[in-house]
Amino acid sequence: MFDASDLRKGVCFQYKGAPMIVVDVNFTTPTARGGGTIAKTKMRNLLTGQLLSESLRSGEKYPPVDVERKSASYLYKDSEHFHFMEADTYEQFAMTADDIGPAAVFLSDGLEGIQAMRVDGTLVSVELPDTVVLEVTEADPVMKGATAKAQFKRAVVGDGIEIKVPGYVAVGTMVKVDTRDGHFVERVR
């Protein structure tokens, strides 16, 4: 059993009869009259993909969910589905953009390091690696002499993802992008 104070990002547990995964959690301790710790959580329903924001009190117990994670890679996209393959069994499976969520824009052919998540043998979700390497396909002109402070410019990477990059990044540059919030991490050489 998980206590509300044990919850961390990526933890899977049962909440109101549904399997949930913690997307984000912050802890607060009210100062009034010995109030217990409160975990303000953002969690995603593994079956429906619905995102919930709940405040859970310390001391409340939640049963764990048996989640099986298998390594997978992304193969290709057809008109409706994204196709993946599990690394150990070579079994292929498909998911829609709604099943994957907003991270679907970061998928590129051959992407590895993906985790296929199954609950009770049923495929419920895929988790992308924290960062992916993408090519800059479009960028504002390089800023010369802008060294007084860090200045960012607009760039387009992958299949139309717009991000902010440092002034020295040009078209054709490979950059590492964070899949959780879409920000520039570093230039890849």
Image: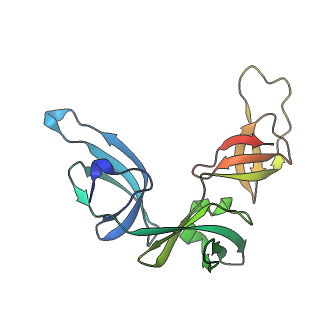
> Residue at left 20%, top 42%?
36
User: What's the residue at 28%, 67% (across, down)?
Assistant: 16
Residue 30 falls left or right of residue 133: left
The colouring scheme, among rainbow, by chain, secondary structure or one colour, is: rainbow
How many marks are shown on the rendered structure? 0
Taking 97 as reference, is 142 left or right?
A: right
Residue at 83% over, 49% down: 138
Which image quadrant is residue 87 in?
bottom right
Image-quadrant location for residue 109: bottom right
Please provide percent x and percent y for residue 41. Answer: 37, 51
Q: In the image, what residue occupies the spot 79% across and 34% down?
A: 167
Q: Is residue 61 above or below residue 185?
A: below
Q: Quadrant of residue 106?
A: bottom right
145 in relation to 38, above or below: above
Q: Is residue 30 left or right of residue 128?
A: left
* Quadrant position of the N terminus in the picture: bottom left
Task: Judge by depth and name the residue closer to the eye, 78 or 140.
Answer: 78
- Give the farthest residue toward the front: 88
Give 41 or 189, whichever is nearer the viewer: 189
- Residue furthest left as drawn: 33
Q: Image check: 171 left or right of 24?
A: right
On the image, the x and y values in percent for residue 153 come to 75, 38
Q: Is residue 122 above or below residue 1?
A: below
| x and y percentages locating residue 169 in the rendered image | 81, 39
Q: Please state the horizontal and vertical placement of residue 186, each as a whole percent of the image.
A: 71, 40
Q: Quadrant of the C terminus?
A: top right
